[in-house]
Structure formats: C-alpha cells, structure tokens
C-alpha cells in the first residue's frame, strides 16, 4: 500500500480515498469505480489523500476500517463510506457551493447516456465463439451509436444560445465542463477503448463524430487523463476474462 498526497489550495475536511492498486502493488489499478471517485475529488478541488491498496497484502488497518469491503472506499473525518453511489451523493452534498463546484448534471438525460454500453461491451469481449461475434459486435456498436446521437444533439441551453443549431458542439455529456455523469462513463469508455483494440482489433469508428469529440476533449483534461490506469494494467486485468477469437 502506498499513499500519495494530492496538493490543493482549498481548506477541507480530512479525506482519504482508498483505491485498488495495480499489479505492482503501488500504482492505480484498473477499477472504473475508483477512478470515478478520484475524478470527483479532483474536480471538487479539495485536499485529499489517495491510498492505493494491494488486496493481496491488505494490511490489518484496512480490514479494521472496512471489513469485507473492496476498494474504493472513503474515509471522511474518520467516517467510513463504502458504497460508490452513496459516496458520490455524499461528496456532492458535503463539498457544495460556494466553496466547491457543483458537479451534478442540469439535464437528467445526461445521467443515463451510455448506461448500457459497458454491459454490451462485456458480452462482446467475453464471448469465445466466433459465430456469435458479429451479432454481439452489432449490439455493442448500437449502444455507441446511441451515445453518439446524444452527444450530437444540442441541449436546451445550446438552443437558447442558437435556436438554429442542429448539431451540438459541447465538450462533455452535460455541457463544457466535466460532471458526475462523465466521471461515471469516461473510465468505462477508456477500458473499452483499450480492451477492444487488444482482443477484437476494434476501434470506436471515427464516423461517430460526437463520441470522438467527447473522448478527444476528455483526454485533454488532467482530471481524466491522469487518473486513468496504464493501458498495460487494463490489458492485464482483462487477460483472464476477455476471449481471443480463433
């Protein structure tokens, strides 16, 4: 287990985020839930400590803090939180304006955009039967197309600015700044990008311009780019479950 301090300027409660460690036992491991919370805390601009946990050698202190739990979990002023969704809600409530930015989406549709992608990706990538690959790939691709349509459709605020707009130019799901929905979806899309290329030689089609724009903008953000696990870590994590087709 290693501990890293994220330097921030804002005064804040004592916060420690425990996340899954990589195979080296020190770096950030492959866990979209861990990355989601890491991004939220970084976007909030709060002082926090990031602790990576090697579950093969989990120290007794962690067993005492969250017995039976898997990372991520949060220590907030000695109060332990273990459910990712509840941690997100808790942080949005506790780290609120005016001191901290609000990260919830303005439009409820943004929260659900891409919600079925990871499930269809899993079915696609874990399938060992070549005869089923085409059908599963089409089903998976349809979920990407659906997300692309949402990203290309102007949101109400864009239409208020330009009633004649037919294609969105926003950077992210809900606007031009990262929101909670992005913290949930982007870590999964990063895994998808790496794993599909490795095991299916499949890349997100450039014809999906909204999705391509979304990912390009996301990788320019420190809060996303620097919280991603290494590609090699993702490939290693999926080695036992992803199936090469012969």
Image (cartoon, rainbow, N blue to C red):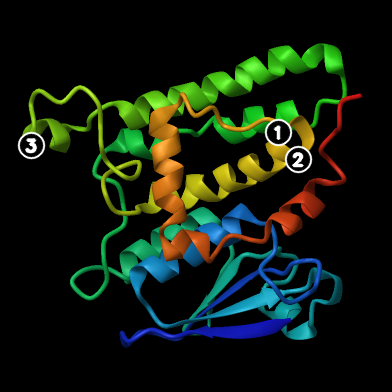
Q: Position of residue 36 (x, y in %)?
A: 51, 57
Q: Earlier in the sequence, mark 3 or mark 1?
A: 1
For disc 1, the neighbor class at 10 Å (few under 14, some 14 to 19, many from 20) is: some
Residue 218 locus on image (x, y percent): 43, 51
Say which residue appears at 26% left-offset and 60% top-offset: 102
Task: Report how far apart the C-alphas of labels 2 and 1 lie in the structure.
Answer: 14 Å
Q: Which label sits on residue 161? A: 3
Under tag 2, what secondary structure? helix
**Could you tell me which residue is drawn at 79 percent across and 83 percent down?**
60
| Residue 7 lies in quadrant | bottom left
Q: Is residue 112 left or right of residue 225?
A: left
As displayed, is residue 33 above or below residue 50? above
* For the residues bearing labels 3 and 1, Cβ distance under 8 angstroms: no
Distance (Cα) linking label 3 and label 2: 42 Å
| Label 3 neighbour load within 10 Å: few <14, some 14-19, many 20+ | few
Q: Which mark is residue 198?
A: 2
Residue 12: x and y, percent?
A: 35, 84
Alpha carbon distance from label 3 to label 1: 39 Å
* 63 relative position to 113: left or right: right
Residue beneath disc 1:
122
């Amino acid at each position: 287990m290693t501990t890293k301090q994220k330097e921030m300027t804002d005064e804040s409660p004592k916060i420690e985020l425990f996340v899954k460690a990589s195979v080296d036992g020190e770096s950030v491991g492959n866990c979209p839930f861990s990355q989601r919370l890491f991004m939220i805390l970084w976007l909030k601009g709060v002082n926090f400590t990031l602790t990576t946990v090697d579950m093969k050698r989990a120290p007794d202190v962690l067993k005492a803090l969250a017995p039976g739990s898997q990372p991520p979990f949060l220590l907030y002023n000695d109060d332990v939180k273990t459910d990712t969704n509840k941690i997100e809600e808790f942080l949005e409530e506790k780290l609120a304006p005016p001191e901290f930015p609000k990260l919830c989406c303005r439009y409820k549709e943004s929260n659900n955009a891409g919600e079925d992608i990871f499930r269809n990706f899993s079915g696609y990538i874990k399938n060992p039967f070549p005869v089923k690959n085409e059908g599963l790939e089409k089903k998976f691709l349809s979920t990407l197309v659906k997300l692309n349509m949402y990203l290309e459709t102007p949101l109400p605020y864009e239409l208020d600015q330009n009633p004649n707009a037919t294609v969105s130019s926003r950077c992210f799901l809900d606007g031009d700044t990262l929101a909670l929905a992005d913290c949930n979806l982007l870590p999964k899309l990063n895994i998808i990008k790496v794993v599909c290329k490795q095991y299916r030689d499949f890349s997100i089609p450039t014809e999906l311009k909204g999705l391509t724009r979304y990912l390009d903008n996301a990788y320019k953000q420190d809060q996303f780019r620097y919280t991603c696990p290494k590609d090699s870590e993702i490939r290693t994590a999926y080695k036992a479950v992803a199936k090469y087709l012969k």
